Amino acid sequence: MTYCVGLLLDSGVVMLSDTRTNAGFDNIACFRKMFVFETPGERAMALLTAGNLAVTQTVVAKLRHEIAREDPARSIMLAPSMLQVAEIVGRTLNGVYVDTDSRMQRGEVSASATMLLGGQRLGGQLRLFLIYPEGNFIEATEDTPYLQIGEHKYGKPILDRVVRPSTSLEAGRKAVLISMDSTLRSNLSVGMPLDLVTIRRDEHRVATRERIEPGDPAFAAMSDAWSRALREGFANLP
Amino acid sequence: MTYCVGLLLDSGVVMLSDTRTNAGFDNIACFRKMFVFETPGERAMALLTAGNLAVTQTVVAKLRHEIAREDPARSIMLAPSMLQVAEIVGRTLNGVYVDTDSRMQRGEVSASATMLLGGQRLGGQLRLFLIYPEGNFIEATEDTPYLQIGEHKYGKPILDRVVRPSTSLEAGRKAVLISMDSTLRSNLSVGMPLDLVTIRRDEHRVATRERIEPGDPAFAAMSDAWSRALREGFANLP
């Protein structure tokens, strides 16, 4: 399982992923699910992946292959808009998904995968997409400024309550970490370390990029403070 | 969908259910999912149901039929222990499930259903069970004093943080309502009104029983206060 979340705020995008993968309950490993693509000053994008690891790794490898080939119609580093980047990712994802899924029917294993894509290129808008295995996608808007993939339920209530487009990048960072904290507590197949990236609007470069390791003191302090706030808020209810 | 939750506390059990049922997205209705069985002073029990409505209604009808027949081996009002009550409910549920499911394969509709059973009889222990369609069951313990059926994920983080066996009945009542509130906000197929029952330990009678209607001012005030507490707690995070 996986939990990835992205926020589209007035001030920028915030994207967070865990790193745990599992093949059954007894085979757990750590794999990066966040991939950053950046030409500082021209474009900055982050791609977060959930689902079948063979599929998502192949998609990322194919995207990189096309970047190296420098074909403007296929490279996400040359595509003239975020919409076209989403289309390239969607087409690549769907191709790998269909090809893999047809060979996996026998084992009744799903080749399904989803991705979050956030970022901006020079002259374009900052955008955040959720891309489905069929290659189609939806986009975050003012009404719903966040998108999630993977184990989304435990971490959704806090996002619904505190995330607005006007939320600052720093508050957005806290919100996704609290949302992840609720998920980590409830689902063993979501696990540390975490990867977090922020991209400020109209900067076209990654603003912050961090890996939060197990036992990270700041994350532990935030998690404890949040538990305390919940318990105190609960105790003070009418 | 459905959300039902039960707490096994030192002071008693608290059980809460919603009332929404749906056959597809376009056919939503309101059905009671909480059934109280009581001989005041001798035994008090509540049964909460989730899953296929035809199955759960048939199970409750069969349980009532056996109560009327007064067969000690089959009536949950005559069974000498809560364990035996759970066994009768489990056997009945499994019988209806297997019978229905075999006829529903063609339509690819699930006949699955689960139930929460909480209560106590004179001379026995207060117990809380989660009964599966296969008729087997698990029981709440000191380590995990709550059980959930249906849409359990949205409402789990708050239970993990505030419910302990030592939690008072009144605080337990607040905890299940807050847990339900998070679920109501996130899943349209869980809906008001709510049914809530409490049974104090060693009283062998229902302590409180209430239906909370849409727009209930106390529930709305609690929900607003909780949202405010979350936002304030979030704003004050380090």
Image (tube, coloured by chain):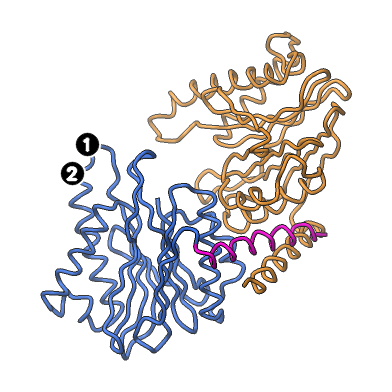
Chain colours: A orange, B blue
| Residue B80 x, y percent position in the rendering | 24, 84
Q: CA distance from mark 1 to mark 2?
A: 7 Å
Q: Which residue is mark 1?
A: B106
On screen, residue B79 versus residue A37, left or right, reads left
Q: Nearer the viewer, residue B219 or A227?
A: B219
Q: Amino acid at mark 2?
A: Arg
For mark 1, give the secondary structure.
Answer: helix
Q: Which residue is mark 2?
A: B103
Position of residue B31 relative to residue B217, above or below, is above
Q: Is residue B236 magenta?
A: yes
Quadrant of the image containing the N terminus of chain A: top right
Q: Quadrant of residue B128?
A: bottom left
Q: Residue at x 82, y 23 (%)?
A: A43
Q: Quadrant of residue B238?
A: bottom right
Q: Is residue A73 magenta?
A: no
| Residue B121 x, y percent position in the rendering | 31, 85
Magenta residue span: B216-238
Q: Give yes or no for contact between labels 1 and 2 (Cβ–Cβ under 8 Å).
A: yes
Question: Label 2 marks which chain's residue?
Answer: B
Question: Label 1 marks which chain's residue?
Answer: B
Residue count near mark 2 (Cα–Cα under 10 Å), binned few <14, some 14–19, many ≥20: few
Position of residue B131 relative to residue A131, above or below, is below
Q: Residue at x 78, y 36 (%)?
A: A10
On screen, residue B71 versus residue A228, left or right, reads left
